[in-house]
Image (cartoon, rainbow, N blue to C red):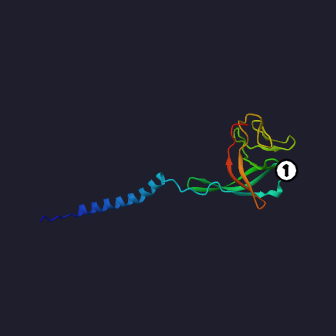
């Protein structure tokens, strides 16, 4: 039977290689998981309280401010946003996104003309969000809306179709 002898140099090399392999796995496995495993689905499309429904008057849009949580990869960001909310007698409660559908500019309600006006590129929208004039290609985008115990709840954004 042949005896195997290892010298000191071979022993140290095998220890160094073994420790290097362990450190490489300790760093490599989490990096691979980060790159190739998508994050778990978090709560999306949550409903946010935007205010009291009693503060709205029929056919008078109000810009309501609220905080919404947005998932950005692995981060959850709480951001302040707004919506133009109007009580339309035949349609009910409607909430519009605060960005113009042309280039995303902020628009405002012109009470004297009774239209939403985008001052940047002269787009105008009716109280129903339909394009009246200007370069805007489609009606205003709407949020899903519901009322729960007198509070306005804003849901996910629904893009308007190109049909005006």
Measuring from the top left, give residue 23's x and y in whole percent.
Answer: 38, 60
Considering depth in this image, is 25 or 116 the residue closer to the camera? Answer: 116
Which residue in the protein does label 1 denote? Answer: 58
Residue sitting at 76 percent across and 34 percent down? 134
Q: Is residue 33 left or right of residue 68?
A: left
Q: Is residue 22 left or right of residue 100?
A: left
Mark 1 neighbour density, 10 Å: few (under 14) some (14–19) many (20 or more):
few
Q: Give the number of callouts.
A: 1
Height in image: 134 above or below 140? above
Measuring from the top left, give residue 13's x and y in whole percent.
Answer: 28, 60
Look at the numbered disc 1 and give the secondary structure of its residue. Answer: loop
Considering depth in this image, is 25 or 13 the residue closer to the camera? Answer: 25
Measuring from the top left, give residue 83's x and y in whole percent.
Answer: 74, 50
Residue sitting at 32 percent across and 61 percent down? 18
Outermost right residue: 112
Q: Quadrant of the C terminus?
A: top right
Outermost left residue: 1
Considering depth in this image, is 83 or 126 the residue closer to the camera? Answer: 126
Q: Quadrant of residue 120?
A: top right
Residue sitting at 30 percent across and 63 percent down? 15
Measuring from the top left, give residue 162's x and y in whole percent.
Answer: 69, 37
Q: Is residue 24 left or right of residue 164?
A: left
Q: Quadrant of the N terminus?
A: bottom left
Q: Is residue 136 left or right of residue 113?
A: left
């Amino acid at each position: 039977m042949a005896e195997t002898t290892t010298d000191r140099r071979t022993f140290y090399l095998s220890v160094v290689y073994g420790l290097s392999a362990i450190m490489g796995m300790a760093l490599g496995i989490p990096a691979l998981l980060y790159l190739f495993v998508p994050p778990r689905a978090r709560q999306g499309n949550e409903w946010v309280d935007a205010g009291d429904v009693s503060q709205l008057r029929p056919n008078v849009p109000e810009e309501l401010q609220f905080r919404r949580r947005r998932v950005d990869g692995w981060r959850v960001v709480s951001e302040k946003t707004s919506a133009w909310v109007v009580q339309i007698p035949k349609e009910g409660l409607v909430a519009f996104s605060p960005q113009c559908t042309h280039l995303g500019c902020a628009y405002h309600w012109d009470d004297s003309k009774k239209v939403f006006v985008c001052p940047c590129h002269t787009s105008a929208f009716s109280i129903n969000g339909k394009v009246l004039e200007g370069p805007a290609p489609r009606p205003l985008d709407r949020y899903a809306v519901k009322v729960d115990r007198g509070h306005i709840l804003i849901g996910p954004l629904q893009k308007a179709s190109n049909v005006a």
